[in-house]
Image (tube, grey):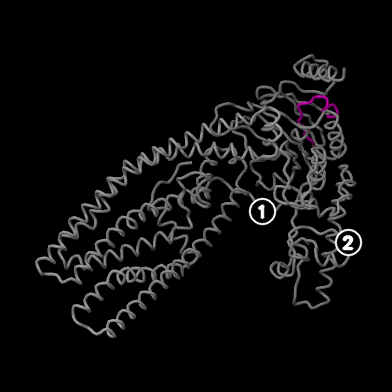
Amino acid sequence: MKQDISVWRGFSGYIGYIWRKDKKLFLYGILLIPAFALADYLTVYLPKMVVLAFEQGKSIPGLAAGVLLTVALLLLCKLVCVTGETSLKHGNRKINRRMIDDFTKKLLYVDYKYLEDADFLSVRNMVHENLFGGQIGNDQKADRLEEFLHALFHWLAAVGTVALYAVYVSLLNPWLLLLLPAVPLGLLFNTSVPRKIELKWAKRGGDAWKKIDYITKKTEDFSMAKDIRMYGMDSWFMSLSKKYRDKRLYFKGREMRASAYGGIVNMTASGVYYIIFDWYVLQSFLRGSMNTADMIFYLQMGVALLRILTDQINSGIADIAKISLGFNRYKNFMAYGENTGVVEVPVKSGMPEIELRHVSFSYPGSDKKILDDFNMKVNPGEKIAIVGVNGAGKTTLMKLICGLLHPDSGQILLNGTDMEEMQAEERYAWFSCVFQDIQFLPLSIGENISMQRAAKGDETREADGATCGSKRIGYSFRKGDETREAGGATCDSKRIRYSFRKGDEAREADGATCDRDAERTEQRIWSCLEKAGMREAVERLPQKLDTLMEKSLNEDAVDFSGGQRQKLILARALYRDAGVLILDEPTASLDALAENDIYEKYAEFAKDKTSFFVSHRLSSTRFCDRIFLIDRGVVAEEGTHGELLASGGLYAEMFAMQSKYYKETAT
């Protein structure tokens, strides 16, 4: 992806984006500018007013009244500033939340091939930092996009304040106006080199911190606790921690040294400014052309000017520029590649024919061909085994077949239609896939099997007219009117629609339909669990289908064994009931007997489907109609289990080695 590094395009683009989302935020910012400038001016002017009153012999009551009035105006300006800043931050934060939602949707709906693209993932990481902030332990925090309006209007307010003070400086001596642009430009030029050095060491220190953070997290990971103790890894962890902590301290010291050089430059520039400005003010006072009150005012104004020029003008420009570049990255990321999730397609339940013609594929950024002029034809209803050594391309082949990846050349035909001509949802609708890295969501068992969430409650019912039950997210399959009233279940929003204009009879009728829909869903889940051999285990749980999974997020969740998780995944695949079943080594972590049991269950339910079974254990694929041995990106051998053994090729050699291992183990 070519990065857009134009600050102006990012700046103008973000302004336009916010304007379209919430125009009133700019009103808050415009009100902030004069309030900020006046508040700063009154702070500087107040001492002058007191001294001038004494010089002119004003009465104490008159002075007190003037001071109170000025303080009241100052407090009013501060109130406007606080209100404006709060409104800006809150509004920009809301817009940032929408951007985060769009960022999340992009990751969910972008074509899967980009998730294998290192360039895409690099941009994703940078945008993530701009949306959520820098990484933990990294001193160089990314400027968050939600800080844009605050930085912009603070900078404009600072410019307005400088413009106000410039009027007074011009009355003192127009030549002194040259100090105003000279100070920030001089500081920017003089600190650029130390800043680059500082960033260089900060990055190296941040890399060391990432390793420290990794080591710390591993020591807190309970899954590592056994290995750490049994293999004496504690001393190794401690030595690594000390090594990278020492590196971190060294890099931090070099970073702070560079920062100190920049500080010296800043102090030198500030000193020159003070000498010139204060010398002229004091000379005017000593010559008698300036009274004491004006001298105090100009001296305080000089301090305020330097503070604004260095702390707000300079840093404000840098912050706005970095955030503008961050929005450019966000905009480029959102436009990256094609998105899926455009249309809804029902699951396809037929038995399709699948053919690969001269398919070649390489991963982005790599010249290595995973598949090279690959050809294969699978007839409707066939059970196909895919075998080969590690790295042969078996998983890549499955991702290509189900449409997650796209071939560099060649065609993948589904019932004679090139899959590249189909929308992504239409391709996915044909497949039930079970991959090696089994994933469950921190939801209930029922939801994890059906992959449908039940958002319930009267508020939701009024919002989209598609659900019934409580506000809790999740299915409630417990029986009885009270439970159903409390837990409810989701109806299909396309079929069931509540209408509060119909009256009680219509509402009761719709509610009854919703209950029937929930019962059918429940019965179907129980049926899939029974076929997968998990019904009894789930029925023994107190919450049954409402039992939560994944203890990492739910304290009350239940952890299942590896075999049980495999059976739950089988139940999920059965529930989806698509026309093509793909099993990509989902049982790699199981023993041979457990794997064989799982595959036999899959084989039983694959009778009316076109099926692919990927396994590194060749004995588990004997039930398949044909076996394809993949080697070096092509089909090296093809046939039934008996035919391949009789041919005496690579398959027979691999099978003999595995058989020998199991015989030796048994002996």
Amino acid of disc 2: Lys
| Residue 343: mark | 1
Instruction: Give the extent of the magenta segment.
Output: 611-624
- Residue under the image location 81 percent in, 27 percent down: 626
Q: Which one is in front, 481 or 626?
A: 481
State the image quarter where residue 472 is shown.
bottom right
Is 623 a magenta residue?
yes
- Residue ID for mark 2: 479
Is 23 a magenta residue?
no
From the viewer's perspective, tell me whether residue 644 is left or right of residue 395. Answer: right
Amino acid of disc 1: Val
Number of labelled discs? 2
SS of the residue under disc 2:
loop
State the image quarter where residue 454 is shown.
bottom right
| Residue 11: mark | none
Instruction: Indicate the position of residue 121 as horizontal and vertical percent values.
Output: 55, 41
- In the picture, which quadrant includes the C terminus? top right
Q: Which one is in front, 372 or 323?
A: 323
Depth-wise, is mark 1 or mark 2 nearer the camera? 2
